[in-house]
Amino acid sequence: MAFISTGYNPDKPMENRITDIGPKDHNEFYPPVIAKNKGKWSHHEILEPGVLVHVADSGDEVYTVRVGGARLMSTGLINEICEIADKHCDGYVRFTTRNNVEFMVDSKDKLEPLKNDLSGRKFAGGSFKFPIGGTGAGITNIVHTQGWIHCHTPATDASGTVKAAMDVLFNDFQDMRLPAQLRVSMACCLNMCGAVHCSDIAILGYHRKPPMLDHEYLDKVCEIPLAVSACPTAAIKPAKVQLANGKEVKSVDVKNERCMYCGNCYTMCPSMPLADTEGDGIVLMAGGKVSNRISDPKFSKVVVAFLPNEMPRWPSMTDTIQRMVEAYAKGANKYERLGDWADRIGWEKFFEVCELDFTHHLIDDFRQQAYMSWRQSTQFKF
Amino acid sequence: MAKHETPLLDQLESGPWPSFVSDLKAQAEKRAKNEEGIEFQIPVDVVDDLLGVVELSYKHGRTHWKHGGIVGVFGYGGGVIGRYCDQPENFPGVEAFHTMRVNQPAGKYYSTDYLKKLCDLWDFRGSGVTNMHGSTGDIILLGTTTKQLEEVFWTLTHDMGQDLGGSGSNLRTPSDCLGQSRCEYACYDTNALVYFLTNEYQDELHRPAFPYKFKFKLDGCPNCCVASIARSDMSFIGTWKDDIRIDQDAVNKYVENDPAYPANAGAHKGSKDWGPFDIEKEVLALCPTKCMKFENKKLTIDNANCTRCMHCINVMPRALKIGKETGCSILCGAKAPILDGAQMGSLLVPFVEVNPDNDYEAITEIIENIWDWWMEEGKNRERLGELIMRQGFQKLLEVTGIDPMPQHVAYPRTNPYIFWKEDEVPGGWERDVDEYRKHHRR
C-alpha cells in the first residue's frame, strides 16, 4: 500500500490550489430530453407504482422508473447503477430527495426492457437491488441519518431500523392503495439531522439516561462554560469534584431530574456520554407533513414514548408502524394525510384505532408548547 | 471468508428491501479480491472492519464511534467530519473513518461518467462506501484516513471540477427539488437559483463565521417536496400571484372519467378501488377556501380567495396550471427540536421575484440583511428561528426593512402586552414627577 500523491504538497499547501468552485453545473447532467423541455412541461401521470411519464408542451415524453435504495450505498452498487443507466438511459440518472434512484428514458418502448432489467437484479442475500415503486398514494423510501454506521451520538441504528421498517412496508412501496402519500422518516437522535419532525410517521432514536460524567478528563477536553450553556433546561452547573486519588478537579454537576437527554451537552463536551444499552431506544411520532396541500404543514406528534432497541429487526417498532398504517388505510378519506385524519377523528380515537397505549409521557410538559396542546374544551370523545 | 462473524447483521439480508448489509458484504469481498488491481490507499479490509464494528453496536446497543476529531482540508472549516473508532485494536481498518461531504449538483442529476469517476476516486482513496445522499443533500463519501483528505480534495477540484459541501457552523450545502427541469408545478427554476446561491456564498459555506448551522432549501411549489418549510433556516417556496389557468375541456375529461385523465395524476392507481372521480367531493369540497364552483360544465375559481394550496392542480394536472406571474415566498426559522423545540418556517416575504438577470438581487438582499443581524446578535449555537423567538418577529421585519402585513400572522396577538418604542408615544417616556404631584397627592 504505497502512498501515491496527486501532486498536493503539504509543505506548500497553497501551491496550485483550487478552492471555492462549488458543485458541478447541473446543466452538464441533464438528460437531453430534460434539457430540451425544461420549464415547458405540460403535465405528468403515474402510469403504475414507480413509473411516471412527464409530457412536455412540445409533445416530448420522458418516462421515469423510480427505484428504492438503501441510502448507504457502495461504489460497487453505484457502478451497477451506471451500467444500467448507460445501457438504457444514455448515461444519465438522478436521485430523489428521499434516496430513490430515478432512471429516465425518452420513449415508451424503452420502458419495459428497463423495468425488467431493474426488477431482475438481487443481492446475494435475496433482497432486491432496485425495487420499483415509491410514487403517489403509497410509501416512498424512508429518509434517514447515519446511526451506528458512522455517528457518535445515535440512540439507535438508522440503516437497520429502516431496512426492518421498509421490509414490512414493502407492499405499500410497490402499491398506491393508501388515501394519500405517507412519508416515513428516521433520525437516530434528537439532533434530527434528518429533520423527521414533520413526517406522517417518524422513527426517532432517543436516550433516556442523563449523561455520565468523566470527571478525570472533563476539564481537559471540554470548555466547561460551553457545556453549561449547552443545556436547554439549565440542568448543568460548574462543580469542583474530588477524584478517588484525592485530587480536586474542575468539572460539572448535572441535576438529573431536569435532564431530557437531548445530548446537546455531549456534543459540546465528549466527557458527558449518555448512550446506554437499556436507556436508549425509539420514539414514534405521527401526523406531520410539509406540504401546504389542503391543510397547513404540521408537526408530528409523539404517539409512542419509548420502544426498546430490539436488534436486529426492531419488531415492536415495525408492528406499531404497521398497525398505524393499516388503521390509516382503513379509516382515512381519499386525499387525507395521516395527521389530517387523526385531527378529524380526534387523537383519542387515533390511539384507540391504532391500538396504542396513552401514557403520561405523551402529555407535553416542555415550555410554552405544552399549554397549546392541552385540551381547553368539553368537545371530546369517550 | 468474512473477517468478522456478523450473526445479527446477517439477519438484515433477508426481506425484499435493498439490504445495506448485503451491499457492504459484496463491497468487502470486492476489495479483498481486487480484480482491478487497485492500489488501495487505505486498508483493504476497511469494509470488513466496518461490518465488524457495526455488529458490535448491534450486540451492545451503543455506537462505537468516538466523539470528535478535528480534521479537514487546508483553508476550509467544513466539508470534512473526522471520525475515529473506539475499538481500534479490534477494527484497525476503521481506526480513522472520516467523512467527506461533496456538494451535490442541483436536482441530483448525474452523468454516469461523473459518477464512475467519483467511484474510482473513492475506491482508490476511501472505503468505497457512500451515502447517496446525506440528509442535507450532499454526496457523502464515508470512510477515509487523514492523509487522504487533501489528496481527495485535490482530485475533486483539479480533475473533476467539484467542491466540498458544508458542515459545522457554516452555510450548509443548499438543496432543491428538481423544479422546472421535470415538473410542471415549479414556479421558478430551483436548479438555477440553488446553483447561484451555492456559488455566491462559497465563503460562508466553507469558512465557519456563523453562530451555528444555516440551511437554504428551495421548493418549486407549495407541495414542498424537499421539506424546506420544516428544515431550513431560509425556505424558498415557489408561488404565483395571478390566476390559475383552466382548460375547461380537460376539466370535463376528468369529470367524464376519461382514462387518459386519471385523477391526482394517477397517484391512486393502486390495489384499492376508490370509485369514479367525483369533482364535487374530491376537489370542490376539499378546497380549503371553498373558492371553486363547477356549474354547467364550467369550472370557476375565485382566485382572489385562493391560497394556492395546490390540491386542485394536483388532482387535475392536465386541466389546471399554476399562474403565469410566478416567483417565490420566503419563510424563515425552521429547525428540528435541538435546542429549543421544533420550529416551522414563518412567512417573511409573501412574494419576491426570482430574477437571474439581476443576480437575484431581491433575494440576496434579504439573505444578507438576515445574516448581518444573526451574526451580530445570535448566541453560540442559536439557530435563526431561536433568535427570532428571542428578539421577536418585529425585529426580523426591522432588519430586513419589510413592512408588517396580515400575511405575517395566522391571527393577530391574543395578549395586549404590546411593547411600544419610546418614540412611538407622544412626549416620550421621560416625565416630571414633581409636575405630576402638583395635581396628585401622595
Image (tube, coloured by chain):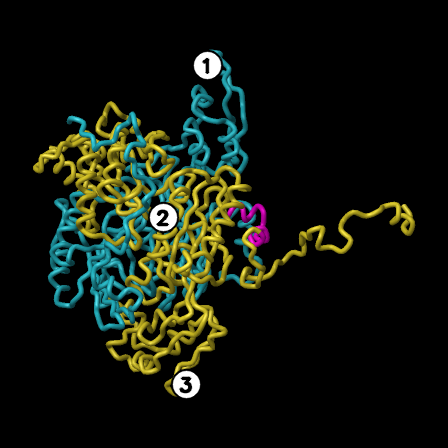
Q: Where's the C terminus of chain B, which quadrant?
A: top right
Q: Residue at x 15, y 68 (%)?
A: A108
Q: Nearer the viewer, mark 2 or mark 1?
A: 2
Chain designation of label 3: B
Amino acid type of the residue that numbered disc 2 sits on in the rendered structure: Asn
Is residue B242 shown left or right of residue A51?
Answer: right
Displayed quadrant of residue B3: top left
Q: Where's the N terminus of chain B, which quadrant?
A: top left
Using a 10 Å C-alpha cutoff, classify the residue at mark 3 as few (fewer than 14 neighbours), some (14 to 19) or many (20 or more).
Answer: few
Q: Residue at x 52, y 44 (%)?
A: B374
Q: Are labels 2 and 3 on one chain? A: yes
Residue A266 visible: yes
Chain designation of label 2: B
Query: Viewer-proximal residue, A256 or A186?
Result: A186
Up-down relation of residue B432 to residue B122 (above or below):
below
Residue A324 visible: no
Q: Which mark is residue B199?
A: 2
Magenta span of residues: B385-398
Look at chain B in the picture and name its colour: yellow
Amino acid type of the residue that numbered disc 1 sits on in the rendered structure: Ala
Task: Name the residue tied to disc 1.
Answer: A244
Residue A43 in the image: x percent, y percent?
A: 29, 70
Q: Residue at x 89, y 48 (%)?
A: B437
Q: Secondary structure at mark 2?
A: helix
Task: Name the residue tied to disc 3.
Answer: B295
Task: Indicate the chain coloured cyan by its letter.
Answer: A
Residue B392 covered by magenta stretch: yes
Tell whether label 1 touches label 2 (CB within 8 Å): no
